[in-house]
Structures are given as C-alpha cells and as structure tokens.
Amino acid sequence: MTSIPRNVAVIGAGIVGVSTALWLAREGQQVTLVDRAGPGEATSFGNAGLLASAATLPVPGPGLLRKAPRMALDPREPLYLRMRHLPALAPWLFRYLRHASAEAARKRADAILPLIGDSLADHQALASGTPAEKYVLPCDYVYGYADRSGFEADRFSWDLRTAQGFDFSVMDRTAFRSYDPIFGDAIGCAVRMPNHGRISDPGAYVKALAAAAEGLGAKFVRSEAKGIVRKDGQVRGLRLDGDTLPCDTVVVAAGAWSKELTRSLGLVVPLHPESGFHIELWDPSQTPRAPLMFAAGKFVITPMEGRIRLAGMVGYGGFDAPPPEAPYRMFLRHLKKALPGLEWKETTRWMGHRPAMADSLPMIGPVPGISGVYTGFGHDHVGLTAGPKTGRILAQMISGRRPNIDVGPFAPERFSC
C-alpha cells in the first residue's frame, strides 16, 4: 500500500519522537524533528535502560490508597513529595488514586500488553541496520525480595503476569547466589523472567536512532515548539521561537511537557510530571548479570557501558523543584545491602520527569476535530519500553494505514467525553 505523502513535524526527540521520525523516514515521509535540547537528552537519557515487557501493572495497584500516606511521610520509602507542591498536585492525584484497585490494574495491564509485550523485538526492528543495534541487548529481568514472603505479598502481580503469558522461575537464596554471586544476603528470594532486554546506553542509543533518521532525510531543528498553526481545521505549521515551520502534520511527543502543547487543542489531559531519579557508579568492580528490581527500594539496578545505573523511585514536586537528597541517600543505603562488595571510582546523579497520566495509559492517535495533529505521550514508567511500537503505530496512522493492535484505550479524546 502506498503511503499518503505528509510533511510531518515531530515535537520531542526522546525515544517516542525519534522512533516516530525514523519509522516515518523509512516510509519516505518528509520529517522534521523538533526539540529544545537534542535527541535523548531528557527522560530518554535517564531511564533504567530496561525493556520491561512484563511491566504491565501500573503504579496505583491494589493497596496503594492504604500505603500512600505513610510512604509520603517516611523518607525511607521510595516516594518523595514536596509538601508545598501538594495543592497543585491534589486534583490530579485524586483522579490517579481512583484507579488504585485490582479491577483498574487488570484493565490497564490488558490494555498496555500489546504495546509493550514484545518490546525487545520492537527495539531490534527499530534499530535494525543502524549503529544503534549494538545498544540493544537481550537479557533476563530479575525481581529481588528479602525473602519468600515478599514474593507472596506480590502474588497479585505475579498471577496477572502468568495470565498474560509471561514465564518466570522463583529462586531461593542459594539458587540466586549461584545465578549471580555478586549480590548479598539482602536478597533471599528472586524471580527470574527471561525474554526481556536492556539498552546499554540509553542516551547514546536515542542519538544513534536520530542520526539514522537524519541519514534517511529527516531534519532536526533545535528550538522550542510554541504552538500549532491551524486554518480551517487543518494544520498549517508549527510555531517555534521566532519562526514558523511549515507542515501539514504535527506529532506531540514531548513527554511530561506535552500538556502545555495540547492545551489549545480541546483535549482534557490529566497529566502530571512525576520525578524519577538515578545514580550511576562508574568503573564498578563487579557488574550484575541482568537488570534487577530491588523490591525493598522500588528501583532497578542495570548494567550499562562502563557503569551500573540505579534508577527509579517516584517524586512529586513540579518542574521547578530542585533535586531532593532523600532519593539518592536511599539508593546508596540499599546499595550497601544489595551489593556489599561493590567498589567504584565515580558517582553521578540525575533527576528527570515522567509523563504520568491519571489512568496510567498513554495518549496515542489523532486529535479529533483537527486534521493533522497526533499525540504520542503519557507512557508513565514504560516510555523506553513502548517507544518503538508507539512510533510505528503513529507512522502507520499518519501514512493512512490501520495499526495491528487495539489503540482504543489510548484514544486522545477519552477524557474529553
């Protein structure tokens, strides 16, 4: 089938925007990628590097309503809340916590499975034939608990993964130490999930993908998108700093910053920026065999090129809040228990912002009533995991083809009805 020719401006050079640009460029579309920084410079730089195919459950699962107040007040918990930000957070948080039930969690898990369940294969297809291929590595994904009771307390999530077709095996302390001897006694029970993947350098990976798109004719413009120019219900251009970029199609893929761009489109977008954190340990004396979710701290320990990255946690303080110290202290406190013999030469740290939707599902698809505007944001904790499939879906839609998965749960207008 011949693609409908388009002149597309993609706002946002993270994994979703770059994936969209690359798939469009492969179809021969005219593409301009717009970002105020550069490819892979924001959240797509700082994530855990994990292709978390089995991460179908949302953060607001069963029991969160009971746990949330204690978690927000205890600095030892994997949640940071800047109290002065609470009035701005409250309306979104109320809608978010309404989804903290078993029924809502199952609904979200079933909706997002087709988007992330084949993430490794999606990334391999996206990177195929480009220098980015070297960063995509198959691996296991391991959950580490203090003991068997921790695993049993998470039975809801493991039963759901079983129902969705994911394989896993449970290891006791002895079996896990045989699997990966660098971990200490803090992990007495581990769950090994095969058929996952990791990105060995997320920032470099996204840059390599962007370069591949440029090699196919895509252009990159370093500028801040200010608004979408429309006439008679049709996109005419993208307003930038002091200029207008002519185009007939716009994709909003700016992650946590997408809400401002969609404000004038008639959409209700219950999105709030959620802070995420990482520290990196450079030139480590040992390297884990596979990414491991350290359940006690709710963060992932991922081997990367030349370093180990500890990434995760949840924070709410708005875009302008300075990085708090508590998350980094917690990383290091748990690290001493998880990897007691580890030594390294240098520590670096990062904070970024995830686009958290009230129902933990992204907005993917055309904006009703405006010909030529598409959204691709709101992926919560699975932006890297879902990026290639999201980009391919958007490229198919823009080129006049029907995606091969049900995109109804991701409809941009679902909150506007």
Image (tube, rainbow, N blue to C red):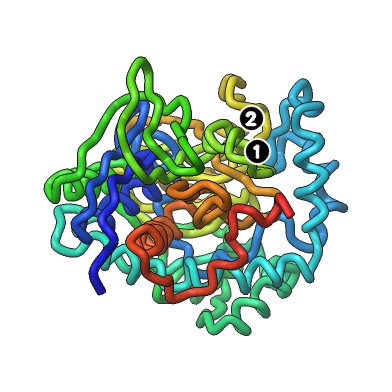
Q: Residue at x 75, y 33 (%)?
A: 89
| Residue at which label 2 appears | 326
* Residue 166 placement (x, y as % from top left): 52, 80
Q: Is residue 376 left or right of residue 81?
A: left
Using the image as rendered, state which of residue 15 and residue 68 is in the foreground.
Answer: 15
Q: Nearer the viewer, residue 308 or 248?
A: 248
In the displayed structure image, the side of residue 175 where residue 159 appears, left or right = right
Residue 375 position (above or below residue 163): above
State the residue at coordinates (33%, 71%): 121
Q: Can the viewer see residue 305?
A: no
Amino acid type at mark 2: Ala
Q: Which residue shows up at 32% across the image and 45% down it?
A: 8
Q: Quadrant of residue 163?
A: bottom right
The residue shown at (29%, 51%) is 6
User: In the image shown, does 337 or 308 lie closer to the viewer?
Assistant: 308
Quarter of the picture holding the N terminus: bottom left
Give the residue at the far front of this rendering: 232
Label 1 crowd (10 A; few <14 / some 14-19 / many >=20): many
| 83 and 149: which is toward the camera | 83
- Does dot 1 land on a helix, a strand or a loop? strand
Measured as percent of width and height from the top left, residue 285 is found at: 31, 46
Q: Position of residue 282 (x, y in %)?
A: 32, 37
Determine which quarter of the picture holds residue 76. top right
Residue 222 x/y as whole percent:
29, 26
SS assignment at label 2: helix
On-image quarter of the C terminus: bottom right
- Which numbered disc covers residue 272? 1
What is the distance, in whole Å, between disc 2 and disc 1 at their CAs? 21 Å
